[in-house]
Image (cartoon, helix red, strand yellow):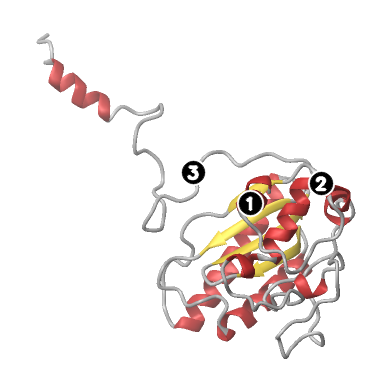
Amino acid sequence: MRRKKKAEQGTLLLFRHGGARKGAGRKPKGDEAGVPHTPRERFAARHPVLVTLKVMRGIWSLRGRRLSTRLWEIIAKANARGGVRIVHFSIQRNHLHLLVEAEDAELLARGMQGLSVRIARMVNRTMGRKGTVFADRYHSRALTTPRAVRNAIAYVLGNARRHGAAPADPTWVDPLSSGYFFDGWTRAVRTTSTMLPSRPSPAERAETWLLSVGWRRAGGRIDPGRRPGPAARRAA
């Protein structure tokens, strides 16, 4: 039998089944590489999780009234369905931050998948479009210490300040977050929303020790005027 040339052998190897190879796997949905498609992080039920969902370019601002009002309702319905508990959240122009409790990674994945589908349908229906809404699958990180949880709370609820979408008033909290309903501020807060405080909170009450009381042991109450920085993001 004639031996194949080395060049031919090399070409055949590129199409070999099995094993890791460069460029393999589902490509990210957005214009840039997004969340690596590695196995989801395992975590204990006692550890809350910081989740980020980012929409694609061209999607209307999530902070606009037409989308934000519906997002508020979707978060409330997600909590009513059970499976996961969205304890804190903030709606930013092109992404959502959530602090979530779940019994395990599988329930978290199911909950976030369902939430993503409902948000995508709502956005497409509102915008009169079809197609992909989220830039990639959600990013998540388990929070295992009081310090990490405290920093994550400050980061999520203060995210509007981080993005320059807040007034100079140190008592102001973002009306498109669960900040108005948070009881861990260092001072009384106010918001510019005309719908609060008569509008009920869509957020769920924390059940984990870390997210209910444990975070207070890492520095106590949080200043509502604090602008979260990179340190808060890393520790979260």
SS state under label 2: helix
Badge nearest the viewer, 1 or 3: 1
Q: Quadrant of the N terminus?
A: top left
Q: Quadrant of residue 88?
A: bottom right
Q: Residue at x 19, y 19 (%)?
A: 9
Badge nearest the viewer, 3 or 2: 2
Q: Is residue 134 left or right of residue 50?
A: left
- Mark 2 closeness class: few <14, some 14–19, many ≥20 residues within 10 Å: many
Q: Residue at x 79, y 42 (%)?
A: 145
Residue 32 in the image: state x and y as whole percent: 38, 54
Lower sequence index among marks 1 and 2: 2
* Label at residue 36: 3
SS state under label 1: helix
Distance Cα–Cα, label 1 vs label 2: 14 Å
Q: Which residue is mark 1?
A: 233
Mark 2 is on which residue type? Pro
Mark 1 is on which residue type? Arg
Instruction: Return the residue nearer the eye: 65 or 44.
Output: 65
* Label at residue 146: 2
Distance Cα–Cα, label 1 vs label 3: 18 Å
Residue 26 showing in the rendered view:
yes
Lower sequence index among marks 1 and 3: 3
